Amino acid sequence: MTYKKKKYKKKKKTVGYKSRLFIVSVLVFSLLAFLILRLAWLTLVSGRELEAKANSEWQKEISVTATRGDILDRNGSVLVSSANVYRIDFDLDSVRNHIKEKKITMNDIAVEISNVTGVEVEEVLKALNKKNSDGSDASYSPLVRGVTKAVADSADDLGIYGLIVSRDVKRYYPNENFLASALGGINSEGTGLTGIELQYDDYLAGIAGMKIGAYDSWGNRLPFDTYKFTPPIDGSDIISTVDENLQYIAEKVAQKGLEEHNAKGVHVLIMDPNNGEILAMVNKPDYDPNDPYSGYEIFDGETDNDKIQNMWRNWLVSDTFEPGSTFKTVTMVAALEEGLVSDNETFTCNGGVKFGNTTVHCWKRDGHGTQTLGEVLKNSCNVGMMEIGERLGIDKLNEYIYKLGFGKTTGIDLPGEASGIVKSSDTVSAIDLATISFGQTNTVTTLQLMAAFNAIANGGDLIQPHIVKEISHEDESGNRVIDETIKPTTKKDVLSDSSTALLRSYLERTVTKDGPDGSFVQGYNVGGKTGTAQKVDPATGTYSTDKYISSMVALAPVENPKITVFIAVDEPSNGSYYGGEVAAPLMKELFEEVFKYMDSPLAKERFSIYKNVIIPDVRGKSIEEAKEILKENDLEAEVKGNGKTIVSMDSYPGSTVKEGTTISITAKDNGQVGKEIIMPDLKGSTKEFAASILDNLGLEYEFEGEGIVYSQSITSGNKIVKGTKVTITLKKEFEY
């Protein structure tokens, strides 16, 4: 029994061992099969994903900033440029590894970085301890931009893992406040924020490059350094339509107006009416885009942000106003186009027009009496314009208002353009029609008003205003390549040549008043119209009794305008507020400066504006002397005869001609020297100018009074002889 029992136990052990061995074998083979399948899966299916994940553990991407394009004036002068600087950022994962490896603290490296960068320790620590929105540690944090190469090198020399130094671009506005509201600015990330910088950001920005660096698990850069590099594509340059010299003139005049009239603002726009180009654009007060958050305190606004936005605001683009009498040009040209008025008909002004129990007054309460059509504009007569508006009717008047671009944006290549308000015909009362006719009720933007005025100047084409001329770049050889030319939208023949030409002649009479052509600015044919508009008080919704916009639009030369100008003085507060008192003197000063510039050889190539010249007397002079005198007066000489002394001229001295005119002079020996002259038109000229002309012509004269020439005892155009005496009456400048 004992033996059998032992034998039974041995047999049971053998069977159990074999079973366990079988089970283990199955498990081993199953595991091997799983591993083989898993390896195949990882190799064939997930390989690329895992490779990318592995690479991400030792490759770090660094963006390489593209150089932002320059903004230039129309002649190539740099208005905005970019300087190469550097930025410092943190790879925070690597920084934390660095701290562990070096057994130091965040404060330790913060102090080191602060010492070389000038950034306060607290700001460095804030960047180093940056958190994600969920409270977890961030992986990346910017520290400072726009540092010099010396600072960047010093930071790099610290040897802190995770401190990234890379190229950056700083925007530089060399002329500070110059053209500020039009140029605009950029934000802290280098993206366009306002003005041209925003409008053309896609062109200016370029495309950032990419640098992929190799690092070990501790954040140390591996010896082979850069793994891959994609260079940035620098931004294109923007060629503006602005003439730097005209902009300087406009800036100076605007600043003077701001100070003289203690105004809320002064705004100036100079354009080429033949292509819609903006030659100068000024808003005062303004700001320095190099420091775009400084100086906002003087601007309107309930909050600091409101004030900053108003400081950056381009009034000429974004603000609307009732145009006042400048709009009378639109009403009159509409009536001329429809044949409802004629040059020689008359209008009677008794000081106002009654509409039921309401009287709409002319600015001259006792009336202008009987006037011709041209005098209605010259006198800025509200009553005359109301009659013209009544003849048109609101449907026809609105037809021209819409046709000339009011009530909708012009599409200028600047952000933030307003559209203004045009009352629909079905809501216009008789009084509304009357006030719309002379520039109240509807609101406009400066750009709309100037686009319409440009159509009057150029003979009838409505051209879209624009401030950018071309988009370009420099090739590797430094040659400028034009990538794109800006072509404005043009609506041809919106108005007729005949109507616009007649209206331009009225505009010249308007600014010269009782003086001769060319007396607004001595020698140049300027046409224009002033405007005075009450501002609406937003608190009451009614017209303010002490807040006005004084404005003027003008063109030159009248026969073939090359430039148009708008000036507005917002809320003058020194007692005067009429456009003729406030805006007209500024306009006159601006044109005087503009013509001085345009008289230069450089500008003549660009503008070709010719002034009127009074022919000097060169009789009795040698040929050489005569030629020199005529040359000094911008006249050409054609010599006839074989003598040495000039005895006669084909045009009498004292006559007025355009500069560049060729004067035929005859030279004889022993010939009788002529003494007849034409009495020149001196009204509107300075005392000094008048004296120089009279001296040259050999006339006796005396002055009475002070100021500019108001009248002369001998009417211009009369033929007289040398030695005749003339009395010149002077008077302080009359208003226009």
Image: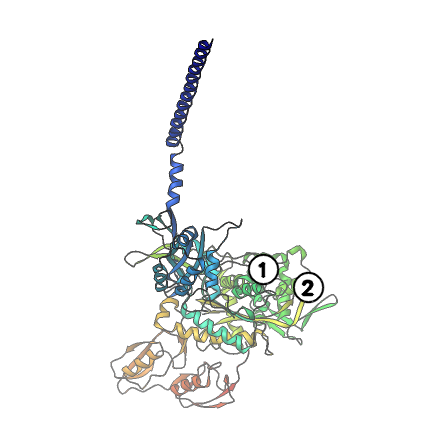
**Residue 325 quadrant:** bottom right
Q: Element at badge 1?
A: loop
Mark nearest the camera among 2 and 1 is 1
Amino acid carrying label 1: it is Gly
Eyeballing the image, is 421 above or below 515? above
Q: Tag 2's secondary structure?
A: helix
Indicate the position of residue 370 as horizontal and vertical percent values: 62, 73
- On residue 420, which mark appears? 1
Mark 2 surroundings within 10 Å by alpha-carbon count, few (fewer than 14), some (14 through 19), many (20 or more): some
Residue 194 seen anywhere in this rendered image of the structure: yes
Asked if 383 appears above or below 419 in the picture, the reply is below
Q: Is residue 537 above or below residue 647?
A: above
Q: Is residue 463 visible?
A: no
- Determine the CA span between mark 2 and mark 1: 20 Å
Depth check: 268 or 440 in front? 268
Q: Which residue is mark 2?
A: 431
Give the residue displayed 35% in from the left and 62% down from the top. 154
Q: Percent x, y for residue 118?
A: 42, 66
Foreground of the two, 309 or 469: 309
Q: Given the image, on which type of amino acid does mark 2 rest?
A: Ile
Whether residues under marks 2 and 1 lie with C-beta atoms below 8 angstroms apart, the answer is no
Quadrant (top left/top right/bottom left/bottom right) for the C terminus: bottom right
Q: Position of residue 267 (x, y in %)?
A: 52, 69
